Image (tube, rainbow, N blue to C red):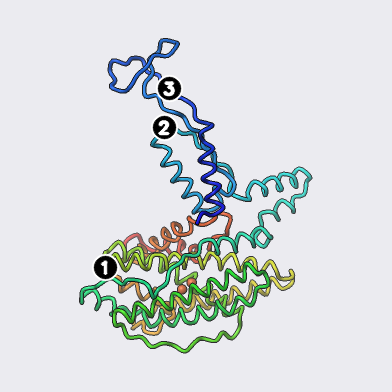
Amino acid sequence: MPSKINTEVDSAAHSLHSYRMPQSDFVGSSEDSSEPTGRNRHGLVRKNIKPLRIMKFGGTSVGDASCIQKVVEIIRAASHDGNLVVVVSAMAGVTNRLIGAATQSAAGHRDAVAAIFEAGTDEHRELLARFFLDTHLQYAPERINWPRLSETDRARLAGLSVWQEAVATENVTSHTVTAAAALESDPQIRKAIELQGFEENRHARLLVALTSHYGIPITAPAAYVPRSLESDFMSAGYGECFDSFFAFGLFSLGQESGYFSSELIAIFEPVVQEEARHILFFVNWVNHRRSQLPWWQRPLFRLRCGWIILKKVMARVRTARTMSGRSGAGDENFTLTARQEIGVPITLRRLVGKCLSENDRRMAVYDPRLLRPRLVPGIARLFYRMLPARD
Ligand SMILES: [Fe+2]
Ligand SMILES: [Fe+2]
């Protein structure tokens, strides 16, 4: 079904015909060329006469990554017919903000200029909800055609130690996130959190579908009941910031090694990207949430965030210690233990480097005006510099 954005891109492309004009590339002689040639009024020989098209895209036509991808496809198709001049203006909403900032700046209102670009503004809140709702993917785990695996591949899959922990994590996260929607008075943000709850529940359904199809025994946990809407939501969110970061690198290494079937990799690719979306939403939500508080409550909110982050870091330090010594059964951070199970001889430095590059790649597709996760990539970058190049 054509969206508003599609329509605008199409209309931009249709309007190009009025800008079509001939263009000539002048060369000195026609004898050494098999291209169609002609002679212009100056007596110069011209070769390869192609129309020049000027294409302009702006506003909602370049409003987000999917719109920009459509623009790229239009440009690619048009490039076969002739030479192009492509003019791209600012993304949707940016021009209005720039004009607003310029007006305030000319009036000498520095604080007003800073506020226009600050997280917690109406624009940021709308962008946060719109980005999440617009990038939702439709799929149903129950309708997936699971690939046929050889007994060796099935046993390898079943032998991974992550399944029970993954099911437990998705159980806690899906119930926590769904309940947290009640925290929000803004209908669009609330809708976005409800959608994230639906997606987390879909991850749990996906794991059930996979494990039952391949005969992997798991015990279904009792439905998790959150104790505190906000604290549990933040605990789940910061937990995902760590786990998803490592999952990005592990998934890519598993894909490169060919250790897992390419069909299984293709099935899980949108799930991993969905987690990138979740942590991007979460870090922006934390800023949005803090901005809604009276100024005197904000320091306490920051302290609570810091305490939750510290607990997550300590849990992962314990996991890392266990990995270097005893069994990792029962560890909270299953992605770290999974590193040992993806069939790739890997150094910790290479894993961290892969996580960093994959994090950048996955985040790059989303609106650049949104805040990016900085804490976990920042810690990882520090470790990457400290670790020996060969270990
Ligand atoms: Fe999930
Ligand atoms: Fe998630």
Task: Give the CA separation, mark 1 to mark 2.
Answer: 45 Å
Q: Which mark is residue 24?
A: 3
Mark 3 and mark 2 lie on one chain; the one further toward the N terminus is 3
Write down the quadrant of residue 23 in the picture.
top left
**SS under mark 3:** strand
Residue at left 61%, top 78%? Answer: 230
**SS under mark 1:** loop
Q: What residue type is disc 1 on?
A: Tyr
CB-based contact (under 8 Å), mark 1 and mark 2 = no
- Above or below, 249 relative to 7: below
Q: What residue type is disc 3 on?
A: Ser
Give the side of residue 266 with respect to residue 379, left or right.
left
Task: Give the CA separation, mark 3 to mark 2.
Answer: 11 Å
Mark 3 and mark 1 lie on one chain; the one further toward the N terminus is 3
**Residue farthest along the right direction in this orientation:** 107
Residue position for label 2:
82
